[in-house]
Image (cartoon, coloured by chain):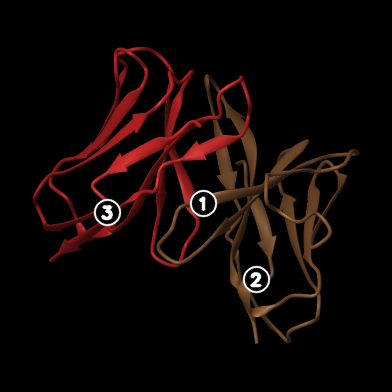
Amino acid sequence: GAVVSQHPSRVICKSGTSVKIECRSLDFQATTMFWYRQFPKKSLMLMATSNEGSKATYEQGVEKDKFLINHASLTLSTLTVTSAHPEDSSFYICSAIFNRGTNYGYTFGSGTRLTVV
Amino acid sequence: GQQVMQIPQYQHVQEGEDFTTYCNSSTTLSNIQWYKQRPGGHPVFLIQLVKSGEVKKQKRLTFQFGEAKKNSSLHITATQTTDVGTYFCAGPREGGSEKLVFGKGTKLTVNP
């Protein structure tokens, strides 16, 4: 249980184009989805928090107009990288909170490796 | 600001040797979580520790949460090649947030 499906897993796009990444919670409802960015051999950097039915909240230094987030339903959140440039090349991962008995943790999507050429 | 520090950054072991990674927070944490990320993969939740001094075991993995709830450790007994990956600790951002602050991770490689 608590699976988040993320697509696409890899995408190569031309500089200046936009790329949409989808994350779906398959067997639970995710009112909140977190979007991370991970550079090679680095830790996870939180970019933004998406909330179903309301505006996303962005971390300091993250351009909201560049990284558009939509959380239209309890099972779907999307991140669109607009006018992508080579410096946007990275590994993007979504995650959502799950509850499992007395534990709670974060389940992650499988990630999207974006390469902008 | 709040920081979660992890050491060592890298660890190379021979198969069968033990491995430990340490996590230290600049602030008291309500809970600490551990994740494993295989090469090319995504982080996978391992465990959450909540209580001061808590110790939890998962087969060869032993997780501890310090008495002051500011540090934690993950110990693997008799490592196997399947243990290869980067282990991250993470704690809630201060202020009661659901957002996590991740350590930089410890990358474990195991020589067969």
| Count of numbered circles in the view | 3
User: Dot 3: within a 10 Å radius of its alpha carbon, few (fewer than 14), some, or many (20 or more) residues?
Assistant: some
* Residue B31 tag number: none
Q: CA distance from mark 2 to mark 1?
A: 15 Å
Q: Are marks 3 and 2 in contact (CB under 8 Å)?
A: no
Q: Is residue A29 visible?
A: no
Are callouts 2 and 1 both on one chain? yes
- Residue placed under numbered mark 2 in the picture: A88
Q: Colour of chain A?
A: brown
Rate crowding at label 1 as few (under 14), some (14 to 19) or many (20 or more) other CA atoms within 10 Å: many
Q: Which mark is residue A44?
A: 1
Amino acid type indicated by mark 1: Leu
Question: In the rendered image, what is the letter of the chain coloured red?
Answer: B
Amino acid at the residue labelled 3 = Asp
Q: Which residue is mark 3?
A: B83
The spot of residue A52 in percent (x, y) is: 85, 39
Q: Amino acid at mark 2?
A: Asp
Q: What residue sits 31% from the left and 28% below the top?
A: B72
Image position of B92 (left or right of B82): right
CB within 8 Å, label 2 to label 1: no
Please give the chain letter of the residue carrying mark 3. B
Q: Is residue B26 left or right of residue B61?
A: right
Secondary-structure class at tag 2: helix
Quadrant into which the N terminus of chain A falls: top right
Q: Residue at x 68, y 44 (%)?
A: A59
Residue B54 on image: x %, y %: 32, 16
Find numbered disc 3 in the image and state the secondary structure of the residue it sits on: helix
Q: CA distance from mark 3 to mark 2?
A: 31 Å
Please give the name of the residue rendered at 27% of the width and 54% of the height, measured from the top-left corner. B83
- Name which residue lies at 47% across and 48% down: B44
Mark 2 neighbour density, 10 Å: few (under 14) some (14–19) many (20 or more): some
